[in-house]
Amino acid sequence: MLESKDLELQIRLTIGTLESNAEAIRQVVLTHLKDYTPENYIGRADEAKADKALLNKADKALNSKRLELEREYMEPFNKFKITITETCKAIKAASAGLDEIVKAEEERECGEKWEKIEDYWNKTGFSLFDITDLAKITDIKKWTNKTAKLKDVLAEIDAIQKKTFDELKILEQFPQEDVSLLKTVYLDTLSITEAMQKANQLKANRERLAREQREREEVERFKKIQEQKKDEWKEEKKAESENESSDLASAALGLEIKPEKTETLEEYALVFSLTRSQFLDLRGYMSDHGITYSELQDKGSGVYTK
């Protein structure tokens, strides 16, 4: 098997000496650059052409020599570079093969640890929800990490189960008709916040429905009173019309119009729907206006005599 020292790169680099007259040529060129300006060749086109060819030839020769020396100088490094690249590629391939083995071992260890966690969960007898549902409120995958100690994970499970019972007990303080639904919401979400929001929603709905019922009953009561007044008005009109017709008929026949007879007392049995205070007010009104009445056995009922 390979050891670390077998993969340590050892280098013995010998830097060669390169001697040339490149610097001297550069100085000559810089010195004579002022001679190669267009104004120095006015009327001397042939000389300009010859000097241009000289300069171009020198440029080509110098650059060609540079490239040749560069290839020669870099050849050992290029061979070294190719060798290292191929070696690293082979090392990576071997490492990738070992990575599969390492991952398989880590998965095996995580699986064994999860089995211990799940076994502990089942032994607690807690059945309100499955252990996998805890992913809604915590990162249960971290429990199988090497850095997570098993005793700390089991202690966290105990705390979660205790918190669940405590929060369910809190929900039992709400109206009895809401408790079952609130617990269902809690067990579905494992969030006391969402359960509380549902409780507030149910409360608001009840208040809205109660307000709607009161308003509807008030509207119906108002309509009924209006209908009663309408019927009373019709009866009064009918009585007035009958009296007028009787008087006209008597006058046409030359009969004496008898004075209006005193109304006879009549008995009516009515059932009223009213509050206790309204009943006392009604009874006072009847007494003030000389209306006698007698109470029946059923509350809210009475016989009134006019």
Image (spheres, rainbow, N blue to C red):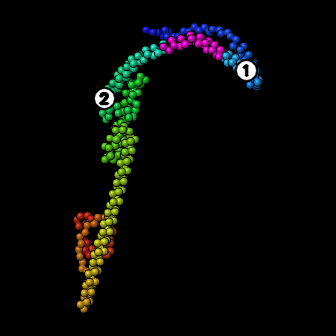
Image label count: 2
Q: In which quarter of the view is residue 10 placed?
A: top right
Q: Residue drawn at (49%, 8%), measured in percent from left and top? A: 6
- CA gap between label 2 and label 1 equals 105 Å
Residue 165 position, x and y percent, is 34, 37
The one of 283 and 230 positioned closer to us in this rendering? 230
Is residue 62 covered in magenta?
yes
The residue tagged with tag 1: helix, strand or loop?
helix
Residue 46 is tagged as 1
Amino acid type at mark 1: Asp
The one of 18 and 88 positioned closer to us in this rendering? 18
- Depth check, mark 2 against mark 1: the one in front is 1
Q: Which stretch is magenta?
A: 60-86
Q: In which quarter of the view is residue 224 placed?
A: bottom left
In this picture, residue 7 sits left or right of residue 44: left
Residue that carries the numbered disc 2 in the rendered image: 122
